[in-house]
Amino acid sequence: MLCGPSLFAHVCCARPNLTRVCLPQSVPQLASSPPSGNSAANNASGRGSIDDQTWRKFIPDALESEEIVKTGRISKRKGFFSKNRQLILTDLPRLVYVDPTAMEYKGNIPWNVSQPVQVKKLSDKKFDVVATMEGGEKRAYHLTAQDGADHWIEAIQHQLDVNK
């Protein structure tokens, strides 16, 4: 359910006896959070910034040579619910997502050289990352980037090309 920019109580249409408190769509940036879309275009060095180190601790079994290519806030939708996440793309390649409020690892999008992901642009802000799970079934991760899907699609596509 989308609500306005202010905090207010809302009576759910489906269940009139249920009252919800609706929060604003955007979540304030944490002091340690990198700006949305950390890439070579946005960061002079493109790598090795203090912000990258903040997010690096959430990469499970990170190799010493593994570098963060891009990180930024996204909304990850599963079913009817969306959750704000910090998405981290590395040059391994790997896609990891973190809860930026609780600062805890939430999961990763399965991706390796033998089972690469596919990226589908749905709109200016929405895109799907389709991964092949163990057993061969496909799973689509529905993502929304407020600063635009193109940056993420280009970064993921670049890692797909580099890691063929």
Image (tube, rainbow, N blue to C red):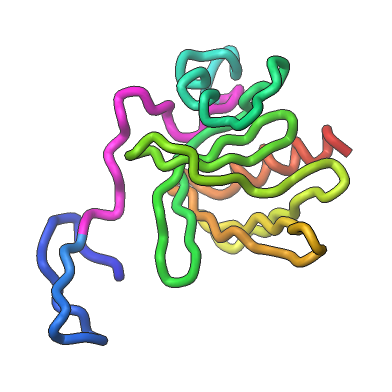
Residue for point 80% across, 48% down: 116
The magenta span reads 23-41
Residue for point 75% across, 36% down: 159
- Helix, strand or loop for the magenta stretch, by majority: loop
Q: Position of residue 92 (x, y in %)?
A: 74, 30
Q: Position of residue 11 (x, y in %)?
A: 14, 78
Q: Is residue 64 left or right of residue 79?
A: right
Q: Position of residue 78 (x, y in %)?
A: 50, 64
Is residue 28 within the magenta segment?
yes
The answer to whether 32 is drawn above or below residue 28 in the figure is above
The answer to whether 127 is drawn above or below residue 154 in the figure is below
The answer to whether 153 is drawn above or below residue 63 in the figure is below
Task: Name the one closer to the observer, 42 or 163.
Answer: 163
Residue for point 38% across, 28% down: 33
Task: Name the one closer to the observer, 105 or 29.
Answer: 105
* Residue 70, quarter of picture: top right
